[in-house]
Amino acid sequence: MTISARNRVSGKVVSLTLGNVMAEVIVEVANGHRIVAAITRRSVYEMGIKEGDEVTAVIKSTDVMIEK
Amino acid sequence: MTISARNRVSGKVVSLTLGNVMAEVIVEVANGHRIVAAITRRSVYEMGIKEGDEVTAVIKSTDVMIEK
Amino acid sequence: MTISARNRVSGKVVSLTLGNVMAEVIVEVANGHRIVAAITRRSVYEMGIKEGDEVTAVIKSTDVMIEK
Amino acid sequence: MTISARNRVSGKVVSLTLGNVMAEVIVEVANGHRIVAAITRRSVYEMGIKEGDEVTAVIKSTDVMIEK
Amino acid sequence: MTISARNRVSGKVVSLTLGNVMAEVIVEVANGHRIVAAITRRSVYEMGIKEGDEVTAVIKSTDVMIEK
Amino acid sequence: MTISARNRVSGKVVSLTLGNVMAEVIVEVANGHRIVAAITRRSVYEMGIKEGDEVTAVIKSTDVMIEK
Protein backbone atom coordinates (compact mmCIF):
# COMPACT_ATOMS: atom_id res chain seq x y z
CA MET A 1 0.00 0.00 0.00
CA THR A 2 1.29 3.46 -0.83
CA ILE A 3 -0.28 6.84 -0.18
CA SER A 4 -0.44 9.80 -2.58
CA ALA A 5 1.26 12.07 -0.02
CA ARG A 6 4.76 11.36 -1.29
CA ASN A 7 6.93 13.54 0.92
CA ARG A 8 8.38 11.11 3.44
CA VAL A 9 11.17 11.57 5.95
CA SER A 10 12.15 8.84 8.40
CA GLY A 11 13.55 9.34 11.87
CA LYS A 12 13.14 8.70 15.57
CA VAL A 13 10.58 10.18 17.97
CA VAL A 14 12.57 12.32 20.42
CA SER A 15 9.73 14.17 22.14
CA LEU A 16 6.04 13.59 22.71
CA THR A 17 3.71 16.15 24.33
CA LEU A 18 0.08 15.28 24.99
CA GLY A 19 -2.83 17.68 25.19
CA ASN A 20 -6.49 16.69 25.70
CA VAL A 21 -7.14 16.59 21.96
CA MET A 22 -3.85 17.14 20.15
CA ALA A 23 -0.34 15.76 20.55
CA GLU A 24 2.98 17.12 19.41
CA VAL A 25 5.43 14.56 18.03
CA ILE A 26 9.01 15.65 17.34
CA VAL A 27 10.94 13.43 14.96
CA GLU A 28 14.71 13.67 14.64
CA VAL A 29 15.76 12.89 11.09
CA ALA A 30 19.13 12.95 9.31
CA ASN A 31 21.73 15.55 10.40
CA GLY A 32 19.97 16.20 13.70
CA HIS A 33 17.22 18.05 11.81
CA ARG A 34 13.81 17.95 13.59
CA ILE A 35 10.30 17.76 12.21
CA VAL A 36 7.31 18.73 14.35
CA ALA A 37 3.95 17.03 13.78
CA ALA A 38 0.68 18.08 15.44
CA ILE A 39 -1.64 15.08 15.27
CA THR A 40 -4.57 13.97 17.44
CA ARG A 41 -3.89 12.43 20.82
CA ARG A 42 -6.21 9.66 19.64
CA SER A 43 -3.79 8.71 16.84
CA VAL A 44 -0.86 8.65 19.26
CA TYR A 45 -2.85 6.31 21.50
CA GLU A 46 -4.20 4.06 18.74
CA MET A 47 -0.79 3.71 17.08
CA GLY A 48 1.07 3.37 20.37
CA ILE A 49 3.55 6.10 19.45
CA LYS A 50 6.24 6.62 22.09
CA GLU A 51 9.69 8.19 22.40
CA GLY A 52 12.36 6.17 20.64
CA ASP A 53 10.00 4.81 17.96
CA GLU A 54 11.21 4.73 14.37
CA VAL A 55 8.56 6.58 12.36
CA THR A 56 8.09 8.39 9.07
CA ALA A 57 6.80 11.94 8.74
CA VAL A 58 4.47 12.19 5.73
CA ILE A 59 3.39 15.43 4.04
CA LYS A 60 1.00 16.12 1.13
CA SER A 61 2.61 18.25 -1.61
CA THR A 62 -0.21 20.81 -1.54
CA ASP A 63 0.80 21.55 2.08
CA VAL A 64 4.40 22.47 1.23
CA MET A 65 5.28 26.16 0.75
CA ILE A 66 8.40 27.61 -0.83
CA GLU A 67 10.39 30.49 0.67
CA LYS A 68 13.00 32.31 -1.40
CA MET B 1 10.49 38.15 10.45
CA THR B 2 9.73 34.53 11.27
CA ILE B 3 6.66 32.45 10.52
CA SER B 4 4.85 30.05 12.85
CA ALA B 5 5.25 27.18 10.35
CA ARG B 6 8.54 25.99 11.82
CA ASN B 7 9.35 22.95 9.69
CA ARG B 8 11.99 24.23 7.28
CA VAL B 9 14.24 22.34 4.91
CA SER B 10 16.63 24.12 2.55
CA GLY B 11 17.74 22.91 -0.85
CA LYS B 12 17.91 23.62 -4.55
CA VAL B 13 15.09 23.66 -7.12
CA VAL B 14 15.79 20.76 -9.49
CA SER B 15 12.49 20.63 -11.38
CA LEU B 16 9.69 23.07 -12.12
CA THR B 17 6.46 22.07 -13.89
CA LEU B 18 3.86 24.72 -14.74
CA GLY B 19 0.14 24.19 -15.13
CA ASN B 20 -2.43 26.94 -15.81
CA VAL B 21 -3.13 27.40 -12.10
CA MET B 22 -0.71 25.25 -10.12
CA ALA B 23 3.00 24.57 -10.34
CA GLU B 24 5.08 21.69 -9.05
CA VAL B 25 8.41 22.62 -7.50
CA ILE B 26 10.86 19.82 -6.65
CA VAL B 27 13.55 20.74 -4.14
CA GLU B 28 16.61 18.56 -3.62
CA VAL B 29 17.72 18.74 -0.01
CA ALA B 30 20.47 16.93 1.95
CA ASN B 31 21.39 13.35 0.95
CA GLY B 32 19.71 13.65 -2.44
CA HIS B 33 16.31 13.56 -0.73
CA ARG B 34 13.55 15.39 -2.68
CA ILE B 35 10.59 17.42 -1.48
CA VAL B 36 7.65 18.13 -3.79
CA ALA B 37 5.65 21.34 -3.37
CA ALA B 38 2.41 22.14 -5.21
CA ILE B 39 2.00 25.91 -5.12
CA THR B 40 0.20 28.35 -7.41
CA ARG B 41 1.76 29.28 -10.73
CA ARG B 42 1.17 32.86 -9.62
CA SER B 43 3.57 32.44 -6.68
CA VAL B 44 6.22 30.93 -8.96
CA TYR B 45 5.88 33.93 -11.27
CA GLU B 46 5.76 36.59 -8.54
CA MET B 47 8.76 35.12 -6.71
CA GLY B 48 10.68 34.39 -9.90
CA ILE B 49 11.33 30.78 -8.88
CA LYS B 50 13.48 28.90 -11.40
CA GLU B 51 15.60 25.75 -11.55
CA GLY B 52 18.85 26.10 -9.61
CA ASP B 53 17.41 28.53 -7.04
CA GLU B 54 18.30 28.02 -3.40
CA VAL B 55 14.96 27.86 -1.56
CA THR B 56 13.45 26.60 1.68
CA ALA B 57 10.47 24.26 1.89
CA VAL B 58 8.22 25.32 4.77
CA ILE B 59 5.50 23.15 6.35
CA LYS B 60 2.97 23.86 9.13
CA SER B 61 3.07 21.24 11.91
CA THR B 62 -0.66 20.53 11.66
CA ASP B 63 0.00 19.31 8.10
CA VAL B 64 2.53 16.65 9.11
CA MET B 65 1.33 13.06 9.58
CA ILE B 66 3.16 10.22 11.30
CA GLU B 67 3.42 6.71 9.86
CA LYS B 68 4.57 3.82 12.03
CA MET C 1 2.31 0.35 8.71
CA THR C 2 -0.45 2.73 9.72
CA ILE C 3 -0.69 6.49 9.27
CA SER C 4 -1.93 9.03 11.82
CA ALA C 5 -4.54 10.33 9.37
CA ARG C 6 -7.26 7.99 10.54
CA ASN C 7 -10.24 8.97 8.42
CA ARG C 8 -10.38 6.28 5.75
CA VAL C 9 -13.09 5.47 3.23
CA SER C 10 -12.67 2.74 0.63
CA GLY C 11 -14.18 2.67 -2.83
CA LYS C 12 -13.56 2.50 -6.55
CA VAL C 13 -12.05 5.13 -8.84
CA VAL C 14 -14.84 6.19 -11.21
CA SER C 15 -13.26 9.26 -12.78
CA LEU C 16 -9.75 10.54 -13.34
CA THR C 17 -8.95 13.98 -14.80
CA LEU C 18 -5.35 14.99 -15.46
CA GLY C 19 -3.94 18.50 -15.50
CA ASN C 20 -0.28 19.40 -16.01
CA VAL C 21 0.39 19.45 -12.28
CA MET C 22 -2.74 18.27 -10.47
CA ALA C 23 -5.16 15.40 -10.99
CA GLU C 24 -8.72 14.94 -9.83
CA VAL C 25 -9.62 11.45 -8.61
CA ILE C 26 -13.28 10.66 -7.92
CA VAL C 27 -13.90 7.67 -5.67
CA GLU C 28 -17.31 6.05 -5.39
CA VAL C 29 -17.81 4.70 -1.88
CA ALA C 30 -20.79 3.05 -0.15
CA ASN C 31 -24.31 4.14 -1.14
CA GLY C 32 -23.12 5.72 -4.38
CA HIS C 33 -21.56 8.56 -2.38
CA ARG C 34 -18.57 10.19 -4.12
CA ILE C 35 -15.35 11.63 -2.70
CA VAL C 36 -13.23 14.02 -4.75
CA ALA C 37 -9.46 14.11 -4.22
CA ALA C 38 -7.11 16.67 -5.78
CA ILE C 39 -3.64 15.15 -5.73
CA THR C 40 -0.57 15.69 -7.91
CA ARG C 41 -0.46 14.19 -11.37
CA ARG C 42 2.92 12.80 -10.31
CA SER C 43 1.28 10.67 -7.59
CA VAL C 44 -1.29 9.33 -10.05
CA TYR C 45 1.54 8.35 -12.38
CA GLU C 46 3.84 6.88 -9.72
CA MET C 47 1.03 4.85 -8.13
CA GLY C 48 -0.47 3.84 -11.46
CA ILE C 49 -3.95 5.00 -10.43
CA LYS C 50 -6.60 4.29 -13.09
CA GLU C 51 -10.38 4.05 -13.35
CA GLY C 52 -11.73 0.91 -11.73
CA ASP C 53 -8.98 0.71 -9.08
CA GLU C 54 -9.96 -0.14 -5.53
CA VAL C 55 -8.49 2.66 -3.39
CA THR C 56 -8.91 4.30 0.00
CA ALA C 57 -9.47 8.03 0.51
CA VAL C 58 -7.51 9.19 3.56
CA ILE C 59 -8.07 12.48 5.43
CA LYS C 60 -6.27 14.06 8.41
CA SER C 61 -8.66 15.03 11.23
CA THR C 62 -7.41 18.63 11.34
CA ASP C 63 -8.69 18.98 7.74
CA VAL C 64 -12.29 18.04 8.60
CA MET C 65 -14.80 20.82 9.25
CA ILE C 66 -18.24 20.52 10.86
CA GLU C 67 -21.37 22.15 9.48
CA LYS C 68 -24.50 22.40 11.60
CA MET D 1 -25.23 29.31 0.11
CA THR D 2 -22.86 26.56 -0.91
CA ILE D 3 -19.16 26.18 -0.21
CA SER D 4 -16.46 25.04 -2.64
CA ALA D 5 -15.40 22.22 -0.30
CA ARG D 6 -17.71 19.67 -1.87
CA ASN D 7 -16.97 16.51 0.11
CA ARG D 8 -19.85 16.26 2.54
CA VAL D 9 -20.92 13.40 4.77
CA SER D 10 -23.83 13.70 7.20
CA GLY D 11 -24.19 11.93 10.51
CA LYS D 12 -24.62 12.27 14.23
CA VAL D 13 -22.14 13.54 16.83
CA VAL D 14 -21.33 10.53 19.06
CA SER D 15 -18.36 11.91 20.97
CA LEU D 16 -17.03 15.33 21.89
CA THR D 17 -13.71 15.92 23.65
CA LEU D 18 -12.68 19.43 24.65
CA GLY D 19 -9.14 20.73 25.07
CA ASN D 20 -8.19 24.32 25.92
CA VAL D 21 -7.85 25.26 22.26
CA MET D 22 -8.97 22.31 20.14
CA ALA D 23 -11.92 19.93 20.26
CA GLU D 24 -12.37 16.48 18.80
CA VAL D 25 -15.77 15.77 17.27
CA ILE D 26 -16.59 12.21 16.23
CA VAL D 27 -19.42 11.86 13.73
CA GLU D 28 -21.08 8.51 13.07
CA VAL D 29 -22.18 8.32 9.45
CA ALA D 30 -23.76 5.52 7.38
CA ASN D 31 -22.82 1.91 8.16
CA GLY D 32 -21.47 2.80 11.60
CA HIS D 33 -18.46 4.43 9.94
CA ARG D 34 -16.89 7.23 12.01
CA ILE D 35 -15.28 10.50 10.95
CA VAL D 36 -13.00 12.40 13.33
CA ALA D 37 -12.78 16.20 13.10
CA ALA D 38 -10.30 18.35 15.03
CA ILE D 39 -11.73 21.86 15.13
CA THR D 40 -11.29 24.75 17.57
CA ARG D 41 -13.05 24.65 20.92
CA ARG D 42 -14.27 28.12 20.01
CA SER D 43 -16.22 26.76 17.02
CA VAL D 44 -17.80 24.04 19.17
CA TYR D 45 -18.91 26.72 21.63
CA GLU D 46 -20.11 29.25 19.05
CA MET D 47 -22.06 26.62 17.10
CA GLY D 48 -23.37 24.91 20.24
CA ILE D 49 -22.22 21.49 19.02
CA LYS D 50 -23.17 18.68 21.41
CA GLU D 51 -23.54 14.89 21.37
CA GLY D 52 -26.57 13.76 19.40
CA ASP D 53 -26.50 16.70 16.99
CA GLU D 54 -27.08 16.01 13.31
CA VAL D 55 -24.10 17.56 11.50
CA THR D 56 -22.22 17.35 8.23
CA ALA D 57 -18.49 16.72 7.95
CA VAL D 58 -17.04 18.88 5.15
CA ILE D 59 -13.64 18.35 3.49
CA LYS D 60 -11.79 20.33 0.79
CA SER D 61 -10.67 18.12 -2.12
CA THR D 62 -7.04 19.27 -1.86
CA ASP D 63 -7.00 17.71 1.63
CA VAL D 64 -7.97 14.21 0.44
CA MET D 65 -5.20 11.67 -0.19
CA ILE D 66 -5.46 8.38 -2.07
CA GLU D 67 -3.99 5.12 -0.82
CA LYS D 68 -3.65 2.14 -3.16
CA MET E 1 -26.30 26.36 8.61
CA THR E 2 -22.89 27.48 9.77
CA ILE E 3 -19.50 25.85 9.25
CA SER E 4 -16.75 25.45 11.84
CA ALA E 5 -14.25 27.26 9.60
CA ARG E 6 -14.96 30.68 11.08
CA ASN E 7 -12.57 32.95 9.21
CA ARG E 8 -14.75 34.65 6.62
CA VAL E 9 -14.06 37.61 4.37
CA SER E 10 -16.56 38.83 1.80
CA GLY E 11 -15.77 40.47 -1.50
CA LYS E 12 -16.14 40.35 -5.26
CA VAL E 13 -14.55 37.94 -7.74
CA VAL E 14 -12.18 40.05 -9.86
CA SER E 15 -10.27 37.29 -11.64
CA LEU E 16 -10.89 33.66 -12.53
CA THR E 17 -8.27 31.40 -14.14
CA LEU E 18 -9.18 27.85 -15.13
CA GLY E 19 -6.84 24.88 -15.36
CA ASN E 20 -7.86 21.32 -16.24
CA VAL E 21 -8.25 20.39 -12.56
CA MET E 22 -7.76 23.51 -10.47
CA ALA E 23 -9.02 27.08 -10.71
CA GLU E 24 -7.69 30.28 -9.22
CA VAL E 25 -10.28 32.70 -7.86
CA ILE E 26 -9.16 36.17 -6.81
CA VAL E 27 -11.51 38.00 -4.47
CA GLU E 28 -11.20 41.72 -3.84
CA VAL E 29 -12.24 42.52 -0.29
CA ALA E 30 -12.23 45.76 1.74
CA ASN E 31 -9.51 48.37 1.05
CA GLY E 32 -8.64 46.83 -2.32
CA HIS E 33 -7.01 43.89 -0.52
CA ARG E 34 -7.04 40.63 -2.55
CA ILE E 35 -7.43 37.01 -1.45
CA VAL E 36 -6.36 34.18 -3.74
CA ALA E 37 -8.18 30.82 -3.55
CA ALA E 38 -7.10 27.66 -5.37
CA ILE E 39 -10.15 25.42 -5.61
CA THR E 40 -11.16 22.71 -8.07
CA ARG E 41 -12.43 23.67 -11.50
CA ARG E 42 -15.32 21.36 -10.69
CA SER E 43 -16.43 23.58 -7.80
CA VAL E 44 -16.24 26.67 -10.00
CA TYR E 45 -18.45 24.94 -12.55
CA GLU E 46 -20.94 23.45 -10.07
CA MET E 47 -21.32 26.75 -8.19
CA GLY E 48 -21.38 28.85 -11.35
CA ILE E 49 -18.66 31.17 -10.04
CA LYS E 50 -17.88 34.04 -12.43
CA GLU E 51 -16.20 37.45 -12.36
CA GLY E 52 -18.30 40.04 -10.54
CA ASP E 53 -19.90 37.52 -8.16
CA GLU E 54 -20.24 38.48 -4.50
CA VAL E 55 -18.61 35.62 -2.57
CA THR E 56 -17.06 34.87 0.80
CA ALA E 57 -13.57 33.45 1.29
CA VAL E 58 -13.61 30.90 4.12
CA ILE E 59 -10.53 29.59 5.97
CA LYS E 60 -10.13 26.97 8.73
CA SER E 61 -8.18 28.31 11.73
CA THR E 62 -5.68 25.42 11.64
CA ASP E 63 -4.64 26.68 8.18
CA VAL E 64 -3.70 30.18 9.37
CA MET E 65 -0.06 30.91 10.19
CA ILE E 66 1.35 33.87 12.10
CA GLU E 67 4.37 35.88 10.98
CA LYS E 68 6.09 38.27 13.38
CA MET F 1 12.73 36.50 1.84
CA THR F 2 9.19 35.89 0.67
CA ILE F 3 7.00 32.82 1.05
CA SER F 4 4.73 31.27 -1.59
CA ALA F 5 1.70 31.56 0.71
CA ARG F 6 0.69 34.97 -0.58
CA ASN F 7 -2.47 35.72 1.37
CA ARG F 8 -1.32 38.13 4.06
CA VAL F 9 -3.33 40.27 6.45
CA SER F 10 -1.67 42.42 9.11
CA GLY F 11 -3.11 43.31 12.48
CA LYS F 12 -2.69 43.18 16.23
CA VAL F 13 -2.92 40.19 18.57
CA VAL F 14 -5.96 40.80 20.77
CA SER F 15 -6.31 37.37 22.38
CA LEU F 16 -4.02 34.44 23.10
CA THR F 17 -5.21 31.13 24.55
CA LEU F 18 -2.71 28.40 25.37
CA GLY F 19 -3.36 24.65 25.43
CA ASN F 20 -0.72 21.99 26.12
CA VAL F 21 0.00 21.53 22.41
CA MET F 22 -1.95 24.15 20.48
CA ALA F 23 -2.54 27.86 20.91
CA GLU F 24 -5.26 30.12 19.57
CA VAL F 25 -4.14 33.54 18.37
CA ILE F 26 -6.80 36.11 17.49
CA VAL F 27 -5.65 38.95 15.27
CA GLU F 28 -7.70 42.11 14.83
CA VAL F 29 -7.23 43.47 11.34
CA ALA F 30 -8.79 46.42 9.48
CA ASN F 31 -12.41 47.36 10.25
CA GLY F 32 -12.41 45.43 13.52
CA HIS F 33 -12.45 42.16 11.56
CA ARG F 34 -10.86 39.23 13.43
CA ILE F 35 -8.79 36.30 12.16
CA VAL F 36 -8.34 33.17 14.29
CA ALA F 37 -5.16 31.11 13.95
CA ALA F 38 -4.59 27.72 15.60
CA ILE F 39 -0.83 27.20 15.75
CA THR F 40 1.39 25.18 18.08
CA ARG F 41 2.10 26.47 21.57
CA ARG F 42 5.74 25.86 20.70
CA SER F 43 5.60 28.47 17.92
CA VAL F 44 3.99 31.00 20.27
CA TYR F 45 6.79 30.40 22.76
CA GLU F 46 9.65 30.40 20.25
CA MET F 47 8.39 33.56 18.54
CA GLY F 48 7.47 35.27 21.81
CA ILE F 49 3.96 36.09 20.57
CA LYS F 50 1.94 38.12 23.09
CA GLU F 51 -1.17 40.31 23.17
CA GLY F 52 -0.59 43.67 21.51
CA ASP F 53 2.00 42.36 19.04
CA GLU F 54 1.80 43.55 15.45
CA VAL F 55 1.70 40.35 13.35
CA THR F 56 0.66 39.12 9.93
CA ALA F 57 -1.74 36.23 9.32
CA VAL F 58 -0.51 34.16 6.36
CA ILE F 59 -2.63 31.64 4.41
CA LYS F 60 -1.76 29.31 1.50
CA SER F 61 -4.16 29.69 -1.45
CA THR F 62 -4.98 25.97 -1.54
CA ASP F 63 -6.45 26.40 1.97
CA VAL F 64 -8.95 29.08 0.94
CA MET F 65 -12.52 28.02 0.12
CA ILE F 66 -15.20 30.03 -1.66
CA GLU F 67 -18.78 30.30 -0.47
CA LYS F 68 -21.47 31.70 -2.76
Image: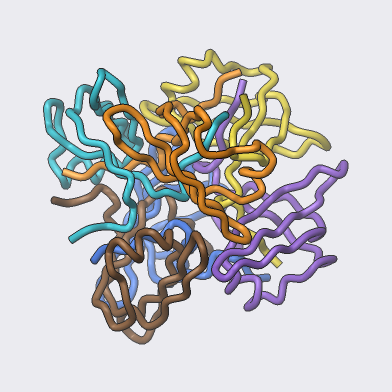
Chain colours: A yellow, B purple, C orange, D cyan, E brown, F blue
Q: Measuring 74% from the left and 55% from the top, which residue is drawn there?
A: B26
Percent of width and height locating residue B46: 63, 78
| Quadrant of the rendering where the N terminus of chain C is positioned | top right
Percent of width and height locating residue E49: 31, 71
Q: How many labels does the image show?
A: 0
Percent of width and height locating residue A12: 71, 24
- Relative to residue A24, is residue F38 depicted above or below? below
Q: Which of B15 and A25 is in front in this view?
A: B15
Q: Nearer the viewer, residue C58 or A31?
A: C58
Q: Measuring 51% from the left and 27% from the top, which residue is drawn there?
A: C4
Q: Which of B8 and E36 is in front in this view?
A: E36
**Extreme residue toward the right, this view:** B31
Percent of width and height locating residue F34: 29, 64
Residue F44 seen by the camera = no
Q: Toward which corner of the image does residue F10 lie, by quadrant?
A: bottom left
Q: Is residue F67 left or right of residue A32?
A: left
Residue B37 seen by the camera = yes
- Relative to residue B50, is residue B63 depicted above or below? above
| Quadrant of the rendering where the C terminus of chain C is positioned | top left
Q: Measuring 62% from the left and 36% from the top, which residue is drawn there?
A: A58
Q: Is residue A27 left or right of residue D25?
A: right
**Extreme residue toward the front, this view:** C52
Q: Toward which corner of the image does residue C50 lie, by quadrant?
A: top right
Q: Measuring 58% from the left and 64% from the top, which residue is drawn there?
A: B22
